[in-house]
Structure formats: structure tokens, C-alpha cells
Image: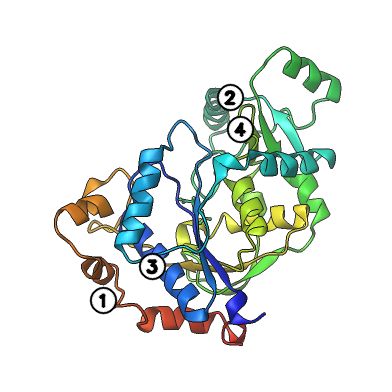
Amino acid sequence: MSAKDAVFRFAPSPNGELHLGHAYSALVNHELARQTGGRFLLRHEDIDLARCTPAFERQVEDDLAFLGISWDEKPRRQSEHMADYAAALEALAAEELVYPAFMSRGEIRAFVDRYESEEGRSWPRDPDGAPLYPGLDRHATTKERERRMSEGERFAWRLDLERAIERVPALGWDEYGASPLGESGPIVARPLEWGDVVLGRMDVPTSYHLSVVVDDALQGITDVVRGRDLFYATSIHRLLQELLGFSPPRYHHHPLILGEDGRKLSKSARDTSLKSLRESGMTAEDIRRMVGLPGRPGGSLSEEILMSRGSSATG
Ligand code: GLU
């Protein structure tokens, strides 16, 4: 592939204000695209309609423009592409790789509490710390599922992970950045760590994992450059790509910008929001320096990332 075919993206959820960590990720992606002669796309990941708002979306675009970032196509808004996700979900359903899961969050919590107090050991958690889905209804009969659905019981579509893994025996990716533990190069995917993840809900036919994989494929993203907090999710993304017949992008997980207390920044912490930094009089150059980038584009950090993409970036 020649460098000018490279397609990068920045894909925030417009459910709060961007912070310094987003600024870093967006700047690095933008610079990589500009330096390779590739394209830079902006995607609004707004499937959570209760929390995402047009005002936050405008704020995202404003903050990016302030940083000197421009995007090459009209931003893709996930809420406008539900048919694409529904089609992917249907393809998985046709292969019996998803099932309607009826346990509510409260029921899962009660199940896990009971297990932990009776067994005296902890129930497995996913890399984000959430308990794995107990999967009690994974093997329900079609008749039983149809009855519960027709009675209006609430459910979510979950991936039948065991069945999915049987289809895709060896799974991995080449990591051009690093995991939180410093692993890089060839990585063996470990989707089992996530359990039967949610891929769709009753009202929204998708979830973060499904829509990110569908969009990266439909938008022809060649390079996913994102924070290390999403390193572990890549195992599920790789699995879904194989199941749906998508070719994988290159993955580069970059270090996170941490707060002064050493913790991950959050959208609710106002002090590091780009909006408040701008309001306090900071310039784009100040913000670049705060995240460890040179005041002007083209400095050493993005060169380092460029080199790590290997020879395909320079061809
Ligand atoms: N929308 C995700 C987030 O804001 C990022 C998705 C991705 O880069 O894969 O954390």
C-alpha cells in the first residue's frame, strides 16, 4: 500500500468536553495523515443518544479547529448509519453467533454477589472491570427465546463467544504502539477475557464494539491510532472483523495523557477540558506543548510513530 492511501481517524463520543488526552490523539492522527499524504477523518460516535448532544458535537469540531485540525470528509455520525450496524448484526444472527440475553444489569450484579459470597472467590471481570456475563440464557431454546421476546421482556444481543471462537481459531494483530504493559509486535488476541459482549440493544441495533468495527471497515481506515486504554478491546474488534469478513487496519495504541494525580483524564474533569483551557487564554501551541508535542506540527514524536508504521508508510 502506498502512503497516500493511508486513512486515519479520530472518533470521539460527543457526550462531554474533549480533554488533553483527546487533543493528543487527534493531533497525532492528523499529523500522521498530513505527513504521509493520507487522509484524516472525523467520526462522531454518538450511538448513546441519551448522552450525546449536538452541542457537544459542535464543541468537538470547534476544539479541533482551534488546534489547527481539519478533516477531509463530512464527519460520519454513527446515529445516521444504524442500517449498516443492523445489517452486520443480522449477518451474525444468521450464523447464530448472537443470542438474546435477558439478564438485566441488576440481575447480573445479584448473580455475581451471590456467587462470590457462596463460593468465596471472585467472579471473572473483563479488562474494564465489569463482571463477565453469566450466560445462563446462552443455551435457551429458540422457542423459549421467542416466547420471552414476544412477551416484551427486555434483552440485549450478545456475542456467543465460544461459538465465535470456534470459527476463528488463531487470532491476533501486529501492535505498532504498545499495550499498558508494554507488549508490542505480534499480539495474540484474547477475546475470552471479555465474555459475551453486548453487540446490540432493543432500541439501538449496535454497541461500541460493533459500530467501531463496521465503521473502520466501511470508511477504509488503514491505521487505528488510539489510546492504550483501548488496547484490550482490540481482541474483540479483531474477532468481529474475522466474523464479518473485514480486513483489519494497523493498530497503534499510544500512551495516555495522565492528570497531575497520575490518573486517566475524564470528560467530567473540567480543569483539563480543552474548552476551559481555551477560556483561560491558552493557545493551540500551549496545548501542543502540554501534551508533549512540539509547538508546531512535524516534530519528533510523530516521526517516531511514522517510523513504527514500518516501510509501508514510506512507500
Ligand atoms: N469513541 C471511542 C472513545 O471515545 C473511541 C473509539 C476508538 O478510537 O476506537 O473512547
Mark 3 — residue?
27
Cα–Cα gap, marks 2 and 4 = 16 Å
Secondary structure, mark 4, is loop
Label 2 packing within 10 angstroms: few (<14), some (14-19), many (20+) = few
- Residue 295, label in figure: 1
Between disc 2 and disc 4, the foreground one is 4
119 vs 20, left or right, is right
Q: Amino acid at mark 1?
A: Gly
Occupied quadrant, residue 301: bottom left
How crowded is the residue under tag 1: few (<14 C-alpha within 10 Å), some, or many (20+)?
some
Amino acid type assigned to the residue bearing label 4 in the image: Val
The answer for how far apart the CA atoms under marks 3 and 4 are is 31 Å
Please tell me which of labels 2 and 1 falls first in the chain.
2
Q: Is mark 2 within 8 Å of ligand 1?
A: no
Give percent across and percent down for residue 51: 43, 34
The residue at 62%/58% (across/down) is 216
Q: CA distance from mark 1 to mark 3?
A: 11 Å
**Three-letter code for the amino acid on which mark 2 is drawn:** Ser
Which badge, 2 or 4, comes first in the chain's sequence?
A: 2
Front in this rendered view, residue 144 or 273: 273
What residue is pinned by disc 2?
Answer: 104
Q: Is the residue at mark 3 in contact range of ligand 1, meaning its CB lies under 8 Å from it?
A: no
Residue ID for mark 4: 204
- Where residue 206 sits, quadrant-wise, is top right
From the viewer's perspective, is 69 left or right of 197?
left
